[in-house]
Amino acid sequence: MEKILITGGAGYVGSHITLNILKRGLKVIVLDSFVNSSKDVFNNFCKVIDKKILKRNFKIITGDIRNKKLLNDIFEDNAKTECAISSVIHCAGLKSVQTSIINPKEYWDVNVLGTMNLVDIMESYSCKKIIFSSSATVYDPSVGDILDENSRISPINPYGSTKFVVEKFLEDIHKSSKNEWKCINLRYFNPIGADPEGIIGESPLKEKNNIFPLIMDVASKKLEKFTIFGNDWDSSDGTCVRDYIHIDDLAESHIKALEYLNNNTPVFMNLNVGTGEGTSVLELIKKFEETNQISIPFIYGERRKGDFGTVVADNRLAKKVLGWIPKKDLKDMCKDGWNWFSNKNI
Ligand code: NAD
């Protein structure tokens, strides 16, 4: 049976991947420092997965990917069992663009050195399959509105630089290993929403940088108004356009990537994970209001430094290679996100 180590498996993306993989009956070990998440995220897993199965197939380890001894212990302990760790889904990392500008060293330390540690230990246990949580921030968004995997790479902040460097590192490892290493970098666009059963959602411990938690704070009246950064962009309503993707579709792309790695000769790939459809911030707010019958008061603020008008994925390669299709629309994202949030918070 497959056993998958999910680093950062308690975070927004990682917890949805963990739930989806456990539902498929595979074994999962989550390694997380809980710097931006809480163990409570797993409390409701038993509502959708049999407790006995959870006990058998699921383990949570608290720790930091920069702790090489801990990583070694995890791989060693599992190598002694009948089921060693066969693949890693590497989500652990720091993800605030703004904080990365203020404290780049911390970002390079966690995102880059942490990954190098992980790969080093994986190699010593002959575990050579990795799916890495990369980001659309690796691209130079000024080259065009729709980005494919060959679009110019030129990150404009330290966060994006760390993602790009890790992608290159994995490519070099793949090449130098005479193709033994199998690596897929999934470049996420803008995941939002929550799992459709309302078990988990997005609840960062640190500052809220993503759009959806802020919209929900306004919806629940924790925040008075939502601020839209700029209304003079080159879009139909003047607000920024992004490629929002349902978190469940994003999680599914990892399952497909895992299947691909298991069934194909050694490979290195970068794949965009988005829907290929652009939605403006104003359109997202309107869809949220219409879907959930809740008003979201907003104001227009200044453009944010370093922001771009439109960032949308060309997702044809991921669809073709992985046989993955994003199935959920904006309404599902708004409905599922609010369903989870309102049950938890109100
Ligand atoms: P998140 O902060 O919710 O999850 C990251 C998890 O990693 C958290 O649980 C955190 O506690 C853990 N972590 C952080 N540093 C760690 C360390 N040193 N050792 C062990 N665990 C550590 O973020 P997310 O939205 O789930 O993002 C997951 C990954 O996807 C990140 O690498 C992020 O850069 C990438 N990504 C996210 C988005 C997005 O919009 N959510 C977009 C593109 C890429």
Image (cartoon, helix red, strand yellow):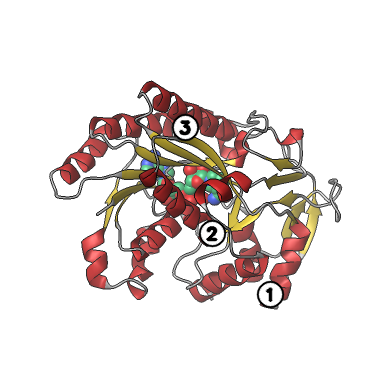
Is label 3 or label 2 in front? Answer: 2
The image position of residue 134, as x and y in percent, is 52, 40
| Rendered image quadrant of residue 236 | bottom right
Say what secondary structure mark 2 lies in.
helix
Quadrant, the N terminus? bottom left
Residue nearest the observer in this picture, 117 or 95: 117
Is label 3 or label 1 in front? Answer: 1
The image position of residue 231, as x and y in percent, is 84, 51
Say what secondary structure mark 1 lies in.
helix
Give me the disc on residue 84: none
Q: Is residue 175 left or right of residue 157?
A: left
Say what secondary structure mark 3 lies in.
helix
Residue nearest the observer in this picture, 186 or 181: 181
Judging by the rendered image, the residue that carries numbered circle 3 is: 106
Amino acid type of the residue that numbered disc 2 sits on in the rendered structure: Asp
The answer to whether 198 is drawn above or below residue 146 in the figure is below
The answer to whether 119 is drawn above or below residue 46 in the figure is above
- Numbered circles on residues, count: 3
Judging by the rendered image, the residue that carries numbered circle 1 is: 291
